[in-house]
Every structure is written in C-alpha cells, then in structure tokens.
Image: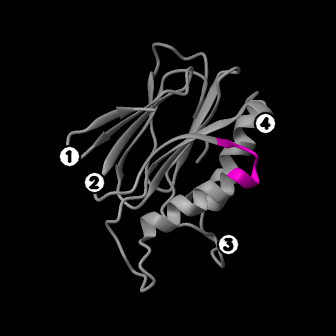
Amino acid sequence: MARLVEGRAGVTDQLKISVADYGVASEGLLTTSGLGSCLGVAVYDPDAPVAALVHPMLPHRDGEGSRPPERFVDSGVELVVEELLEAGGDRGALEAKITGGAAVVDFGSDGESIGDRNVVAAREALEAHDVDVVAEEVGGECGRTVRVDAKTGSVTVKRTDGVETRL
C-alpha cells in the first residue's frame, strides 16, 4: 500500500513499512524490521528530497500476478521508482541503498540462498531503471532493522548481532 507522508511534521515522523509493503515520504523516517532474507531497498532523490523504502520477500514476480508488486524485488523496485517520480523525484538523480539478504532461508540446491537471489534481483532491477546503487549492507546471517531519513537518504542499519552501520 503506497503512502506519501509530506508536510506532516508533528503528526508523524516515522512510517513503519511491513513485509511486502512500501512507503514514500518527503520527511521523517521510513522504517522496517525483521529483514532476514528479505530486503530493504531504499531509493531516494537527494535533491527533491523524497525517499521510498520497499520490503520485498522474493526476487521475481514470475507467475504471481495476483500478489502485490511490493512482495517481489523486481516489481517492488519498479513500483517505488514510479512513485518517486510521481512525488517529484528526478529519474537522473535517483540513488539506492540495499540492505538485508541474509542467508537465513535456503530452499535452493544451487548454493544460493533466497537472500543472495534477492540481492542479485535488486541490483538488476535498479540497473534496469537506471538507479545507481551507492551503498549496501547485505548478506551474512544476521537479521536487520533499517531506518531511512527521507530528507537526506541516510540509511541506518542495526543488525541482530548489535552492529550498527550508517550508509
């Protein structure tokens, strides 16, 4: 479900994004938690300023037309790029930061975890939309919580092992 938080200081300064969901904001924080093999893909325009955060679960939407696009990395990235452009973002200025993609679930026999496949799908989807990936905090075996500052595009990642990183 798309949500645009704009000019609402004092009403809310934080928008919680659930799994298979996304949000768009021009101020405040976009937050999500429980990132294991899922991703937190932050896309923002540092000049607008406007930012989006999508929390997809699976890499590709193949054959899942009835499921919401934000459930999947490829269609979720496409959706937030479109939403950012509608909110005043400039395609040429958009940047992305990818978080999550831990190896907590492995259904494949090819050695790649769902997390690995999600990260690859995010890089490919962002490249397809001409969005540069400027930072990543991905992989490993730790879960993550993510906060995105909508005005600056700054991303703070806190891992379950206690490590906190600013991207």
Q: Do the residues labelled 4 and 1 touch (CB within 8 Å)?
A: no
Local SS, label 3: loop
Q: Mark 4 points at which residue?
A: 91
Chain-order first, disc 2 or disc 1: 2
Q: Name the residue under label 1.
A: 161
Image point 67% across, 51% down: which residue? 126
Q: Mark 2 points at which residue?
A: 142
Q: Do the residues labelled 2 and 4 touch (CB within 8 Å)?
A: no
Q: Position of residue 116 (x, y in %)?
A: 46, 65
Question: Residue 131 colored magenta?
Answer: yes
Local SS, label 1: loop
Q: Do the residues labelled 2 and 1 touch (CB within 8 Å)?
A: yes
- Spatial CA distance of label 2 from label 4 is 33 Å
Relative height, residue 105 to residue 72 (above, below): below
Instruction: Decide if residue 123 is on the left or right side of residue 155.
Output: right
Relative height, residue 107 to residue 82 (above, below): below
Q: Give the range drawn in magenta.
A: 127-132
Chain-order first, disc 4 or disc 3: 3
Q: Neighbour class for label 1 at 10 Å: few (<14), some, many (≥20)?
A: few
Question: What kind of residue is marked 2?
Answer: Cys
